[in-house]
Image: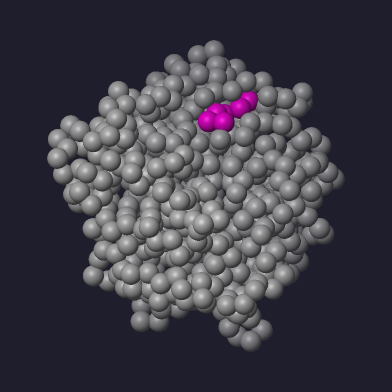
Amino acid sequence: MKNKTSLAFKLAAGAFALAVLALMAGCSLTDEKAPQGPQSGSSIIINPDGDTLYVANGDTNSVSIIDAKSRKVLKEIAVGKEPRELSLSNDGKTLYVTCRYADSVEWVDIKAGKVLGTVKTGIEPFGIVSSPGGERLYVTNYRSGTVTVIDAEKRTIIKQLDAGTNPRAIAISADGASLYVSDYLNTDTLVFDTVSLRKTTSTKLAPSPDLPDRKKSQGTPNTVEQLRLTPDGSNIWEAHLLTNTDTPIQFEEVIFPALSILDVKTTKEKLNARKELFASIDVKDKLGKTTIVSNPTDIVFSPDGTKAYSLMGGSEDLLTFDLARGGRASQIIRHLPGDFPIGMVMSPAGDTLYIHNLSSHDLTVVNLPSESEGGQAKVEGKPIALIAKDRLTPEQRLGKTIFYSANTEDFPITGNNWMSCVSCHSDGEVDTLTLTTSRGPRNIPSNVLALETGLFMWDGSRDDFVDYIHTIQGEMGGMSDVDPGKPMPADKQKIFDALEAYMKMPDAFPVPESPYRTADGQLTPEAEQGKILFEGKAQCITCHATDVMTDSVKAVDSQGKLTTDNTDYLHDVGTVSKTDTDYGGDARGAFANKRARGFYDTPTLRGIYATAPYLHDGSAATLEDVLARAGDKHGKTSSLSAKELSNLVAYLKQIQ
């Protein structure tokens, strides 16, 4: 129990100092329980008494309140679109919810079961934590590249902090003095002083060095799903992937799970402490082989800090690390019940883990017996349903589950639990990386509008979604029993149909809002001039045509059906590299879908600002780089002045 005296002492000692105390004038700090220890943003939280759980239900646009003792849902409350993370007021009366696609934080009256008010933050708010005294909220805005600091009582914005490109995971120290933010894609960890509201340091996660054995963990860090401070506040753990970009795509040699550790005092990464496959993450199966896990999504610690529990959202497993005995993984629960576990919280007593399964919308309970009782984590009963009705159809839900799952036992699209669709398409979109393929280097494209933009692949060599059987077999290691040249078996066709149904949903991967537009969402004057150039002098619209801004949708036959036979809309834009090769076609295309090197399908420009790097091989870091090398093969840009080029880029960045 925190009282006014102890809180004031901590504030005066440096957590919020005199400058912040002035901002707190009028706040009602009462004798209520506040969260103890460091806090991280999460889709599931528990109150200090440990008797009530709160869960953000994502695509059903609701939050659920659960009695932790009876395991019953007390309420399901409607909120804004795509609630992602939660924070609880110190008096336990108000729930703060980030609503990603509503661009807002909502104040929810728990007793009344309704939204009291909202604050517009930035574009796509995601992570949220509150200060120890409860007077401030800190919110990461994924598309705006900012952290919004909010007065929790007045519901007003105190300040917007620049926070990189794609800030997502967020944590705050126990004393409230330091705020930690991780960039989802480029893996920068930013530290902010909460008194001055200034960034103090920034640390990028280091690559893991190449190894002779390509099946051993190595590569570039990306896709940071969570960061957590240890109970004593001395270290930061981050859950992320490693991608081996210089090895041809093969499911056992490219994507690896990792947990990285930073020293809080020095803000330096402890490189030798990183936990990776075949090193610290190495639990043997009955045959003595390493049990493969994938796509880590969360970490929590026992109250005394001697154990860490890591959630593997892709393979749907729970790993236990014994930090008092060398720190290696000592136990695995394979596989957890429920689909796509993304967050978890521990009871205050440290004897229970509650795991939030985002796709199946339920809660898995794991008991954590003491060492004297055996010490082995064990699932308790069946998952607890969190919602009354699913917003998605059964087919759409199945498709979403498959898209995020690397659980080979449940879905045969991946080999040995190594990777899922989101292992490369982070959050369904891009991971900013260029991978090595048999055709040459290929930039990971976004799935935004993927089912609406004509031919598939950079060379337009696929015209049917089921053609992705070649990706599943050749890159993901799945469906090896299927002959791709024959009609798809019914059970496998069901998987493709479900994936397609999900990806066609307008809000599966919505076009990103542009942070470069005006405050009211309009084109800037510079972008208006750029639009005129785009549609006129620069002739960009010649290829980037139609509502989806690509001419690929015109690649049809005489009956109007999309076909790889129509190559009229493939273009040589001068971007071929020496490593690109001709393509001899594939079995699904009856080897008639051959492609000559150097001719490429036109990508959509909707939301292009969010898809760097650019071009088929990722060789252009910025849109300015694209235009600088385009000449007159990529539109008519050679005669544009510097000002015209600037205006054209301004427009491109604001297309949505």
Residue visible at 55% across and 56% down in the picture: 559
Going by the picture, which residue comes out furthest to the bottom?
Answer: 287
Q: How is the image coloured?
A: one colour
- Range shown magenta: 102-107
* Rendered position, 8 above or below 301: above
Residue visible at 61% across and 38% down in the picture: 82
80 relative position to 198: left or right: right
x and y, in percent, of residue 558 in the image: 51, 57
Front residue of 298/405: it is 405
x and y, in percent, of residue 314 in the image: 59, 62
Q: Quadrant of the C terminus?
A: top left
Say which quarter of the image contains residue 369: bottom right
Front residue of 136/540: it is 540
Residue visible at 54% across and 53% down in the picture: 560
181 relative position to 490: left or right: left
Image mark count: 0
* Rendered position, 474 above or below 536: below
455 relative position to 489: left or right: left
x and y, in percent, of residue 424 in the image: 47, 60
Q: Quadrant of the N terminus?
A: top right
Q: Is residue 471 magenta?
A: no
Secondary structure of the magenta portion, mostly?
Answer: strand
Front residue of 526/221: it is 526
Say which quarter of the image contains residue 417: bottom right
Going by the picture, which residue comes out furthest to the front?
Answer: 558
Q: Does residue 52 appear in this view?
A: no
* Rendered position, 176 above or below 629: above
Residue visible at 68% across and 24% down in the picture: 115
Front residue of 548/556: it is 556
